[in-house]
């Protein structure tokens, strides 16, 4: 049982928040790509449609690395959060295009 205020709880909370940020950025980027009609017209909408998902993911990974500072090397944390984003993106795309892929992606 985890005790409130322990170092382990803080560690789990920090890493959980960091992973949630990265997964949330992947999902929000997918919403940008699936629903472009929600974006403003003209140049800001095009910029958000084209660059928004990548920028969101870069900012989320940067925040996640900053939140977990001091636990392991920075490059290791960047790689871990990039792999988490890749896994989340694969699952989102697999469930989105499940009918057209005929479950061949598993």
Image: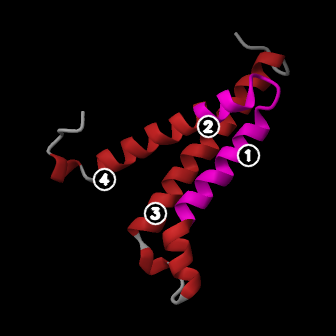
Sooner in the amino-acid sequence: mark 3 or mark 4: 3
Residue at left 76%, top 32%?
68
**Residue at mark 4:** 96
Front tag of 1 and 4 = 1
Determine which residue is flagged by label 3: 31
Magenta: main secondary structure: helix
Check residue 63 in the rendering and tell me which mark sits there, or answer none: 1
Instruction: Tell me the residue that label 2 is attached to.
Output: 19
**For the point 59% across and 31% down, which residue is it?**
80
Q: Secondary structure at mark 1?
A: helix
Placement of 41 over or under 70, stated as above or below: below
Up-down: is 85 above or below 47?
above
Magenta-tinted stretch: 52-79
**Element assignment for label 4:** helix
Mark drawn on residue 99: none
Q: Is residue 94 shown above or below 32? A: above
- In three-dimensional space, the C-alpha distance between marks 1 and 3, rounded to whole angstroms, equals 21 Å
Mark 4, other Cα within 10 Å: few <14 / some 14–19 / many ≥20: few
Left/right placement of residue 98 relative to residue 36 reads left
On the image, the x and y values in percent for residue 3 come to 79, 14
Q: Earlier in the sequence, mark 1 or mark 4?
A: 1
Q: Are marks 1 and 4 in contact (CB under 8 Å)?
A: no
Q: CA distance from mark 3 to mark 4?
A: 11 Å
């Amino acid at each position: 049982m985890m005790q409130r205020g322990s170092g382990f709880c803080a560690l789990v909370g920090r890493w959980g928040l960091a992973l949630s940020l990265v997964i949330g950025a992947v999902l929000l980027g997918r919403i940008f790509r699936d629903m472009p009609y929600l974006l403003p017209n003209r140049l800001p909408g095009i910029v958000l449609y084209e660059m928004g998902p990548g920028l969101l993911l870069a900012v989320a990974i940067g925040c996640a690395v900053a939140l977990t500072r001091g636990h392991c090397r920075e490059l290791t944390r960047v790689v871990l959060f990039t792999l988490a984003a890749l896994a989340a993106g694969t699952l989102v795309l697999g469930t989105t295009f499940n009918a057209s892929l005929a479950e061949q992606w598993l």
